[in-house]
Image (cartoon, rainbow, N blue to C red):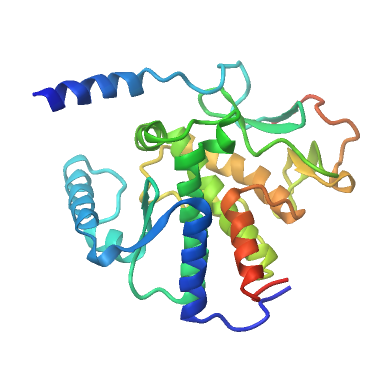
Amino acid sequence: MALKRALTDLDARYFLSEMGNRLRGRVLDKAHAVEMQIVANVLDTVRLVAGASLPDAQTFMRDYATTIGPLVYLPDGWDAKTRIDVGTHEFEHVNQFWRGEYGGVGGFSAGPSFAYLYLMDEEVRVRAEQRAMRAQWEVRRVVFGEELPHPSTFATILEGGYALSDKGLKLARDLAEIWTTEVHYGRIDTAAGETAIRVLTAAGLHG
Amino acid sequence: MRLSIVSTLLGITLAACPHPEPRSNCAPGSTKCEQGRSYVCSPGQYWTPSSNPCEGPRMCCLSQNPSSGRSVFACVPPEACIEAHADAGEVE
């Protein structure tokens, strides 16, 4: 299955706006956000002082989308498909902030404690990122008809920029083994993935 | 001053939050089904849910990842199960 027509910049703007309405988030321009410049400088300092596996300020501003609570910061210059793809990922983090992991049933809880645990506990960071990557791939598979890569890909992605130990990367790989199996067999399980598919269908791009 | 006291208390409160799952003696990386939901054993030996409980025609059972070939417990259609019984055992 593939898209019904080519994506436009307007499609991406509509998509991100609708995702924001439905999942209670808002997309902002990262390049012009003073708070992101501050975060970039803090990361740079931590990276230089502690030698942590973190991106430098320029890479952070150009190549990384960032979500803080309900606010999604997207860099300039990304094409429509990338904004939809990465936007889906980031809106799963928005959902984690508001509802916790699995709506707070059997997973980490919502709100400031999620933000705190994401920063302080690598297991939570891995779980949150794997879930967000799953959301992306639910859309890629259903809407764009893409084949899932090997599960180890989703651990490799986290090797740089997330300050993970070998144990954290192993958990990433183990979780990816399960969710890629489920997505392969058509299971949509994330709020952002399900919402994104609905929005793209309502926009006449899928279905 | 007041801000730093509030921040410290908030930090202690957040830092004292318990892990959402009880610690187990599971083998890290092993998977299991329990009450229709798949779990993976984390490096810290916690059974960690890997998705929401199965719904509709899907069931939690032993299945094979199509890319890696590794057998894991997951929520899949019954025809994708390689073991008849759900909620049975663990696999590493």
Give the x, y percent position of residue A103: 57, 36
Give the x, y percent position of residue A155: 51, 48
Residue displayed at 78% across by 45% down: B64
Comparing B50 with B28, the one in front is: B50
Viewer can see residue A152:
no
Give the x, y percent position of residue A62: 31, 66
Viewer can see residue A163:
yes
Comparing A145 with A181, the one in front is: A145
Q: How many marks can you see?
A: 0
Residue displayed at 57% across by 43% down: A173
Single out the residue that lies furthest toward the left.
B1
Taking the image as shown, residue B92 lies to the left or right of residue A82, namely right
Residue displayed at 82% across by 25% down: B88
Quadrant, the N terminus of chain A: bottom right
Residue displayed at 27% across by 43% down: A52
Single out the residue that lies furthest toward the front.
A21
